[in-house]
Amino acid sequence: MLLVALVPLLAACVPMLGSEAGASPSPSSAAGPTAVVERVVDGDTVIVDLDGERTRVRLLNVDTPESVAEDRPVECLGPEASEFLKDLLPEGSEVTLAYDEERVDRYDRTLATVMTDDGRNASVELARAGLAEAITVGPNDRFRPDVQAAMEEAQRADRGLWDPSGPCAR
């Protein structure tokens, strides 16, 4: 009888446990066009081949430290965020793009969540690693809750940008 009562409780905890273990939530409602990664520009921007067009994509709901901006200095963990994204999205890999309300930013970049071929949200993975802050620009908040949760996980674990004894400690 006790086991029967615990089953719904355990089922409710499974998604939280999966998130803590390092797996991004499934992109069930996120299916969009597929693209091929040409290169990673920095921690939150990639160039993909989308239907034969070279497309610059700005990842939604994350802001990583600068590493290539001409008018700004390299910021703490900027190069590490770029390398992390290069490992997550290697050249030639297939990704799925998922859009929100606004599709293009003021710099003419496509705004999208980028899902790896195994269904991981690249923005969530960057935040979980402590290499990105969760942000919302305009109405684009569809994927923000998952990114926010991953950032908070990194903060609790003192990972990356939130490591009090790390290179970015203030």
Image (cartoon, grey):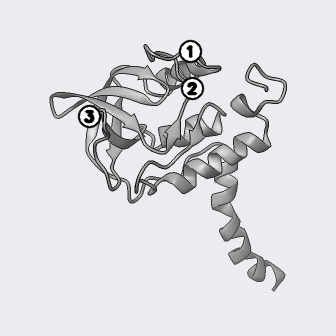
Q: Is residue 87 left or right of residue 130?
A: left
Please give the residue where the numbered disc 3 appears in the rendered image: 108
Counting labels gives 3
What amino acid does circle 2 point to?
Pro
Marks 1,2: beta carbons within 8 A = yes
Looking at the image, the residue that sits furthest to the bottom is 1
Image point (56%, 15%), residue name: 74
Secondary element type, mark 1: loop
Secondary element type, mark 3: loop
Image point (77%, 76%), residue name: 6
Residue 11 appearing in the image: yes
Q: Which mark is residue 65?
A: 2
Marks 2,3: beta carbons within 8 A = no
Check the image and report above or below for 63 versus 98: above
Q: Is residue 82 left or right of residue 14?
A: left
| Image spot of residue 94 (x, y percent) | 33, 32
Marks 1,3: beta carbons within 8 A = no
Please give the residue where the numbered disc 1 appears in the rendered image: 74
Disc 2: CA contacts within 10 A as few (<14), some (14-19) or many (>=20): many
Image point (60%, 50%), residue name: 148
Residue 21 appearing in the image: no
Q: Please state which of residues 19 and 149 is positioned toward the viewer in this rendering.
A: 149
